[in-house]
Image: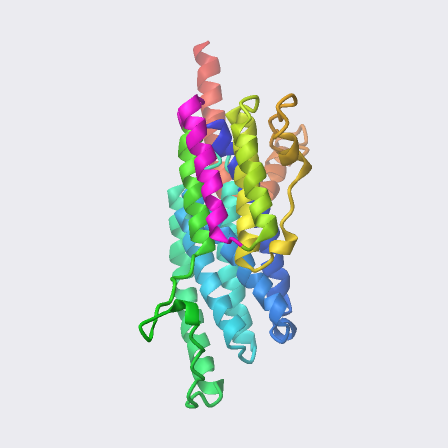
Amino acid sequence: MDDNKQQIIYYFIEEAQEHLETVEQGLLDLAEVISDAERVNEMFRAAHSIKGGAAMLGFEGIQATAHKLEDCFKILRDHPVPIDRRLESLFLKGYDALKALVEELANSPTTSLRPEIVDGILSGSAANFVELQEYLEEMLNTHTHDTTKEAPVPAVNRDMAVGGTAVMAPPINIVATVTTALQQMLVLFKQGDNAANRQQLVDIARSLVTVEANATNWQALVSVTAQAIANHHNTYNAVAPLVIRELKQAGDLLAANRDRDITISAHLQQATITAAPVAPVAPVVVIAQITIPVNVRGAAQGILQNFSRQQVTELVVLLHRAISNSKQN
């Protein structure tokens, strides 16, 4: 796998795990959280961010599952409903499915998803998500207040009216626009460094200023990002994970109307300095270890306690191959 994309996947896993913690904390206290609009919105944004990152990297199973949770959180955000144990249980099962997919990716030595594992998780959670959606709609219909009153007609901006007919400018989908731009950048980063290629990357970065013209911090970040890419002292291996990560995080904040929270990291600022190229950021890989007794029975018990059935099967296969190779040698 391309080093740049692998580094970006590490960043995605790290962020996804943080977003999962936000979702879990909210769901474990859902009866209280439902009365706090900001906390409900936090869960919505967490699922939304995981969906966007998975879409950018092509992890369709994670994207689809996060999207389903996002849709359900949107209902809670827009139409708070009474929380009961059944609803809590359905939400937690949906969360468990998303967490299982992210853990599968995090534990993969190839930073990829095994189709058979993903298919099993998706098929196992499908019925739960259907029941969750139906139950939410049922509770919504039961507890919705009178909605027959005519909604007020919004005032038409005079500047948007032509010949007495309102002309509404279509809203920009910030996350979709940023995600598309990042996907295009990933393709170019993979193609290798040359003047024309680097200029295309700069142009894509600069085009993102049109996403939100009044967002001061977003505008500043986009400008610095373009400068970092244009700095030919920065290798693609160094600059690609950096700009992808910062634009992704900033785009999520912008979509949540949090331009004030967008900041430019010192690492990105350093990347704009011609005389001081940014160094590649090495991924942090934590390798879990266990202690196995010398005696055979104790070793077998230790393995069974610390490994899943599938992992034990894989271990047996590897040992068999090792024994066969040693006999041949």
Q: Residue furthest front?
A: 163
Query: Where's residue 221, x and y in %?
Result: 58, 43
Taking depth in this image into account, of 15 and 96 the one nearest to the observer is 15
State whether the magenta stretch is mostly helix, strand or loop: helix
Taking depth in this image into account, of 17 and 265 the one nearest to the observer is 265
The residue at 45%/27% (across/down) is: 198
Above or below 226: residue 16 = below
Taking depth in this image into account, of 189 and 109 the one nearest to the observer is 189
Above or below 162: residue 303 = above
Is residue 203 found inside the magenta-colored segment of the image? Answer: yes
The residue at 39%/48% (across/down) is: 60
Above or below 167: residue 307 = above
Is residue 52 found inside the magenta-colored segment of the image? Answer: no
- Quarter of the image for residue 150 reads bottom left
Query: Where's residue 78, x and y in %?
Result: 51, 74
Q: Is residue 320 visible?
A: yes
Q: Is residue 287 visible?
A: no
Query: Where's residue 272, x and y in %?
Result: 61, 30
Query: Where's residue 318, x and y in %?
Result: 47, 27
| Magenta region, residue range | 191-213
Above or below 134: residue 205 = above
Give the colouring mode of the picture.
rainbow
